[in-house]
Image: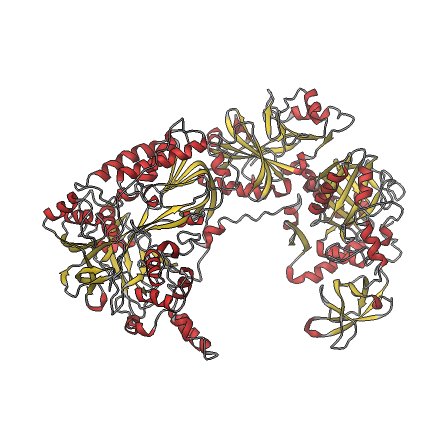
């Protein structure tokens, strides 16, 4: 369908008539213009039915044309529940209706509307909870009927991100109040962020008429924008929704696929107000819309909202709407004013002078639909006789457009999130906001100021207040603005015996539903919300909160202030999880040799935020790869990247004293050039880390820590020295050093080719010694340690040399068939030696006695962290112990965490658990470590382990280590 | 193809694999990206430069400040301030007792070597390992605060973070030291991060720069 009916310029602020756009809606082709929303383009083609209501499947059309209601929810190919009055048209766009059975125009489920009296408020809660099991039967049917739109389960993730924005002042809303506030603040030197939800600045100036001639708004907007858009101190975000207010003016602002996290010293909310509807029968028909929706259609999109209109109003704005309609060639059959007289005689006279019938003290009592409720075709107008009551005599006006305005509700959501309180003024029939936090201000109609000049002054007043806080006010005094305009009609609710007088369009809630909820005992508005679901739909009470508050107050004999409205929580408008997630930052750390591992086909595994090679080969060949690598280390030479090991340097006169206090062993007399095992316990006597201490000089130690534990160890050291005040400098040097463990019988031969300035002989560099020198010219620290139980050297070099070290070792080791090995292999090799891994073989209760680490505790020194607890727990009767066990090859292999039982009975107690277990080719059996009950520790005895499938295997306790019990190989 | 390659040296930058299109030059016994076929205008617009191999050093302790003063280096008065020498070295004061010295691009870090050759005070001054513990990545150009706002929650606009300021803050969820300075009047944010996370930060910053037309630049683009 074409768009031949568009109005002439200057109507159509948002569209570019030189750029036509073709798209499809429900299978039919339509045309619009670039800048059109889907709803405006369809309206421009005469298509008004956009959606079906949630419960009764009633036809719905544009209501606000501002993305403030659920009437325009449509389905795009990849996205349900898109607001058609927000989403722009684009060539080739395929749009579908949603929530219908059959077709959008011929929805078979519309029949539900005829059964509405059988589905009263709370119907679901009251109907399906008994008899027992009833819900299970109904659930599938109800779930199928409920919900809107269809998810695309093949959706591919898209790029969303976040960014911070910092400004002195953020102004939310760019209507006249927001523009004047922004200008005032910026002119004084403040850095200002102006946030506007719509695609253009101006707010109500872009669509509202403020004077009889219709000239004031355009001229004012032009003037203000000329200043704002050129202002160096103002940053503007349009099509951007401020979706929440958090403490200290932390504001999430969503624009496109980005969430800005705005930080502002001062925040001025000039969010305006939502025009409110009138409650009468059939007030939801397509063709019935807010007055502002009709003017938006004309001024933003050049779309004629109808041919013959009736305007129903509770304020003078309705008269101005009538004048705007008349100017655009739309016949106005009548202005129906619910008040007894207009506030401005001049405005009313101007309308009458154009030949329009004005009925004061009247309302629309019922809208008459075309067949199938597809559009309004007439209205039944009656005289108001009392609050909510009308006379029996009626007048009928044929029309295809009804513009309505019962008044305005401040856009209070952000302000109530900030702790602001709503107070209802019975005289003005309007809510006002108070008790706002410091540095948050309001201006314009959200502040109950409605006259245009007053709004401008109110914006400046808010800015001056903010400037005072910023120290930029320059002596200017903020003057309170008083506005006496009354814009709200106090009771725009006219219940009809036949219902369909909707309070909440989203949830198809009628006036009687709200009243009935209170009669069922739900007197609190929060309970009314939860029972009736009022305000829980996509529009979040923008139009239902005020009539609901009035109805509940009236039904419970309270004031509207006492009744209040339901809690406003972020987000203000729908946002996607993608906005919340943004671009996910997931830091990773790589050793200097990382890429070499990848080139060698390593299967990488996480170790904290590091990536380490588990083994080299195909993942599905894990065991074979591990066993081959282990055998190679045992028989030839292997090399493993151990750069992720923690490294901490301690320097200063008190370094040895500090080591002595922090670790369990004795370190005061550790010789220079020697290493020593270092166990760290916490104040509860639990082993929390271990490593190797190297004494580089009298006042210089280099101590390693576990990969995942080094941050904690460093933190503990800093914490303790904050108390001890020892003269020692502590530095975490983990990333400063890359390291490898060169291990195996041929490791010395490899190293001898490269380390020409170090005596590598067994005597010159014995087991547990520390040396410094150069490896292929690279400055290196070398430790002779035996974690895997072979002749081996840990070589630590500055990180920038790490990759080169790997390269030279590979090259030098070629003649000895050197082979890299991974962490999984290392774990097997150390298991064969019975060495524990802290955090794998320990838990939050493991004390040194349970781990057979008594030898690593100095009893001669007076103190170490955790000493008193260690003494106490080790003096108690022991309940468990970590032991080595074996199982014959071919037995079902226990996994880490499998339970150790007191006996093989099905009712046996749990006495422990397996911490490490692998098949060892060197030993020829399954070997492992497990906590067992204290009665199960006898070497040679057996204990049961419950393995996968509930099977129980009998493990034999053995002496550690499993391999090379004399430790001869590592001391070669 | 560059005649000089990073792998021809035993010292290597932590991010050299991200610089496959670079022309390298030798700096302090390692390869530094000198040219990326874009140049000065890109540095003015939005560039990212790897200076990890450029010499730097650090000292901590009660006598660290006097050690630097003895080397004629300008010591910033307060923590989180940076000063610059006539030669172009940056002196960072990270706390009351901790100082880092970053080499000048112009002399390939020779000034830092001179500082390192000086003997340390007998006590209360410890050399740090920031040449290896930290990578040095530098953002350049006109959009520095906006780029950083995508990865960092600290206000780094010029009015809050003028030249000579330092921020020790998380960026892209890792700890970084951000220094605001200029090289040949080009606005720069030098970022010192955990060397093991350098590739991660490099990729994150490139991603953040993309909407500003950011590209990798070489050191020649600074002149």
Q: Which residue shows up at 29% across the image and 49% down it?
A: A428
The quarter in which the N terminus of chain A is drawn is bottom left
B133 or A872: which is nearer to us? A872
> From the viewer's perspective, is A736 left or right of A480?
right
A475 or A697: which is nearer to us? A475
The quadrant holding residue A776 is top right
A418 or B81: which is nearer to us? A418
Q: Which residue shows up at 39% across the image and 29% down it?
A: A188
The quadrant holding residue B198 is top right
Please say whether residue B46 is visible from this viewpoint: yes
Q: Which residue shows up at 40% across the image and 34% down it?
A: A465
Task: Pinpoint residue A469: horizontal percent, then vertical percent.
Answer: 45, 33
A26 over B22 or under it: above or below: below
Specify the farthest residue to the front: A557
> From the viewer's perspective, is A107 left or right of A140?
left
Task: Pinpoint residue A528: horizontal percent, then vertical percent.
Answer: 39, 63
Color scheme of the displayed model: secondary structure
> From the viewer's perspective, is A108 left or right of A764?
left
Task: Pinpoint residue A37: horizontal percent, then vertical percent.
Answer: 29, 51
Please say whether residue A753 is visible from this viewpoint: no
Specify the farthest residue to the bottom: A131
Q: How many marks?
A: 0
A9 over A184 or under it: above or below: below
A623 or A808: which is nearer to us? A623
> From the viewer's perspective, is A263 left or right of A955?
left
Task: Pinpoint residue B194: horizontal percent, then vertical percent.
Answer: 63, 40
């Amino acid at each position: 369908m074409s768009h031949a009916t568009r109005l002439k310029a200057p109507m159509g602020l948002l569209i570019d008539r030189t750029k036509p756009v073709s798209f499809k809606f429900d299978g039919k082709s339509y045309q619009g213009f670039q800048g059109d929303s889907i709803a405006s383009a369809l309206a421009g083609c005469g298509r008004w039915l956009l959606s079906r209501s949630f419960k009764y499947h009633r036809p719905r059309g544009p209501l606000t044309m501002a993305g403030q209601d659920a009437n325009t929810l449509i389905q795009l190919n990849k996205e349900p529940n898109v607001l058609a009055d927000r989403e722009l048209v684009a060539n080739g766009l395929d749009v579908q209706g949603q929530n219908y059975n059959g077709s959008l125009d011929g929805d078979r489920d519309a029949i539900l509307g005829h059964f509405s009296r059988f589905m009263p408020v709370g119907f679901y809660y009251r109907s399906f909870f008994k008899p027992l099991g009833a819900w299970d039967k109904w659930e599938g049917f109800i779930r199928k009927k409920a919900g809107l739109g269809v998810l695309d389960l093949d959706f591919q993730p898209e790029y969303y991100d976040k960014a911070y924005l910092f400004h002195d002042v953020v102004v939310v809303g760019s209507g006249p109040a927001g523009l004047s506030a922004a200008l005032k603040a910026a002119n004084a030197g403040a850095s200002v962020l102006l946030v506007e939800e719509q695609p253009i600045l101006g707010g109500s100036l872009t669509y509202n008429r403020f004077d009889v001639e219709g000239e004031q708004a355009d001229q004012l907007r032009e003037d203000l924008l000329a200043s704002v858009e050129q202002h160096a101190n103002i940053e503007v975000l349009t099509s951007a929704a401020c979706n929440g207010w958090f403490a200290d003016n932390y504001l999430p602002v969503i624009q496109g696929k980005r969430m800005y996290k705005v930080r502002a010293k001062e925040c001025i909310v000039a969010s305006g107000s939502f025009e409110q509807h009138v409650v009468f029968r059939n007030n939801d028909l397509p063709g019935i819309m807010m007055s502002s929706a009709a003017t938006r259609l004309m001024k933003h999109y050049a779309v004629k909202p109808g041919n013959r209109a009736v305007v129903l109003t509770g304020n003078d704005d309705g008269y101005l709407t009538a004048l705007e309609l008349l100017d655009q060639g739309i016949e106005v059959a009548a202005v129906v004013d619910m008040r007894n007289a207009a506030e401005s005689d001049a405005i009313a006279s101007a309308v009458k002078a154009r030949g329009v019938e004005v009925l004061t003290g009247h309302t629309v009592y019922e809208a008459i639909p075309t067949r199938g409720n597809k559009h309004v075709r007439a209205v039944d107008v009656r005289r108001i006789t009392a609050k909510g009551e009308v006379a029996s005599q009626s007048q009928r006006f044929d029309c295809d457009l009804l513009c309505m305005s019962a008044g305005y509700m401040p856009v209070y959501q952000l302000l109530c999130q900030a702790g602001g309180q709503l107070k209802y003024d019975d005289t003005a029939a309007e809510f006002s906001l108070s008790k706002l936090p410091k540095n948050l201000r309001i201006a314009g109609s959200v502040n109950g100021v409605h006259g245009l000049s007053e709004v401008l002054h109110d914006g400046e007043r808010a800015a001056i207040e903010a400037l005072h806080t910023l120290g930029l006010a320059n002596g200017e005094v903020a003057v309170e603005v008083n506005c006496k305009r009354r814009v709200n009609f106090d009771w725009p609710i006219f219940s009809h015996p036949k219902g369909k007088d909707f309070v909440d369009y989203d949830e198809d809630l009628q006036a009687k539903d709200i009243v009935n909820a209170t009669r069922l005992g739900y007197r609190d508005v929060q309970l009314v919300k939860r029972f009736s679901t009022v305000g829980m739909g996509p529009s979040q009470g923008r139009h239902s909160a005020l009539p609901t508050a009035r109805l509940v107050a009236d039904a419970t004999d309270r004031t509207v202030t006492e009744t209040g409205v339901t809690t406003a929580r972020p987000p203000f408008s729908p946002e996607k999880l993608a906005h919340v997630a943004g671009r996910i930052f997931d830091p990773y750390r790589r050793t200097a040799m990382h890429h070499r591992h990848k080139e060698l086909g390593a299967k990488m595994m996480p170790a904290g935020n590091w990536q380490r090679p588990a083994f080299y080969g195909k993942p599905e060949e894990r065991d074979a790869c591990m066993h081959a690598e282990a055998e190679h280390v045992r028989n030839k030479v292997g090399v493993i990247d151990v750069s992720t090991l923690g490294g901490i340097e301690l320097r200063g006169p008190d370094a040895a004293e500090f080591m002595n206090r922090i670790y369990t062993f004795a370190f005061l007399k550790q010789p220079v050039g020697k290493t020593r095992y270092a166990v760290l316990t916490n104040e509860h006597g639990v082993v929390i880390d271990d490593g190797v201490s190297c004494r580089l000089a009298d006042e210089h130690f280099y101590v390693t820590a576990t990969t995942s534990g080094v941050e904690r160890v460093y933190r503990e050291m800093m914490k303790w020295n904050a108390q001890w005040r020892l003269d020692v400098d502590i530095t975490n040097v983990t990333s400063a050093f890359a390291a490898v463990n060169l291990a195996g019988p041929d490791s010395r031969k490899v190293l001898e080719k490269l380390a020409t300035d170090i005596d590598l002989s067994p005597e010159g560099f014995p087991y547990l010694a520390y040396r410094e020198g150069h490896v292929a010219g690279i400055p290196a620290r070398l430790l002779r340690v035996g974690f895997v139980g072979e002749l081996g050297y840990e070589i630590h070099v500055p990180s920038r040399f790490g990759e080169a070290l790997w390269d030279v070792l590979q090259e030098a080791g070629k003649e000895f068939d050197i082979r890299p090995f991974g962490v999984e292999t290392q774990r097997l090799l150390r298991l064969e030696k019975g060495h524990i891994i802290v955090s794998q073989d320990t838990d939050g209760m493991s004390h040194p006695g349970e781990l057979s680490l008594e030898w690593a505790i100095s009893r001669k020194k007076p103190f170490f962290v955790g000493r008193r607890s260690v003494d106490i727990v080790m003096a108690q009767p022991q309940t468990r112990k970590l032991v080595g066990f074996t199982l014959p090859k071919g037995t079902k292999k226990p996994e880490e965490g499998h339970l150790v039982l007191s006996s093989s009975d099905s009712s046996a107690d749990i006495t422990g658990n397996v911490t490490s277990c692998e098949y060892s080719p060197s030993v020829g059996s399954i070997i492992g470590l497990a906590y067992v009950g204290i009665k199960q520790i006898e070497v040679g005895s057996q204990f049961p382990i419950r393995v996968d499938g509930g099977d129980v295997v009998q493990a034999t306790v053995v002496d550690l280590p499993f391999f090379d019990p004399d430790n001869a190989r590592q001391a070669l | 193809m560059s005649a000089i390659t990073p792998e021809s040296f035993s010292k290597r930058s932590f991010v050299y694999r991200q610089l496959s299109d670079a022309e390298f030059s030798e700096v302090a016994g390692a390869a530094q990206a000198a040219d990326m076929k874009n140049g000065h205008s890109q540095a003015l617009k939005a560039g990212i430069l790897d200076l990890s191999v450029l010499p730097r050093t650090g000292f901590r302790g009660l006598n660290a400040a006097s050690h630097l003063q003895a080397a004629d280096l300008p010591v910033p008065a307060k923590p989180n301030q940076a000063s610059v020498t006539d030669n172009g070295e940056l002196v960072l004061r990270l706390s009351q007792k901790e100082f880092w010295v970053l080499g000048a691009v112009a002399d390939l870090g020779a000034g830092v070597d001179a500082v390192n050759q000086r003997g340390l005070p007998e006590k209360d001054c410890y050399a740090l390992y920031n040449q290896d513990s930290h990578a040095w990545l530098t953002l350049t150009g006109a959009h520095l605060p906006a780029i950083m706002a995508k990865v960092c929650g600290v206000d780094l606009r010029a009015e809050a973070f003028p030249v000579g300021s330092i921020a020790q803050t998380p960026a892209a969820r890792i700890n970084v030291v951000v220094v605001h300075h200029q090289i040949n009047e080009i606005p720069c944010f030098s970022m010192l991060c955990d060397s093991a996370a350098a590739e991660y930060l490099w990729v994150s910053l490139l991603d953040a720069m993309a909407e500003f037309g950011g590209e990798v630049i070489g050191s020649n683009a600074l002149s």
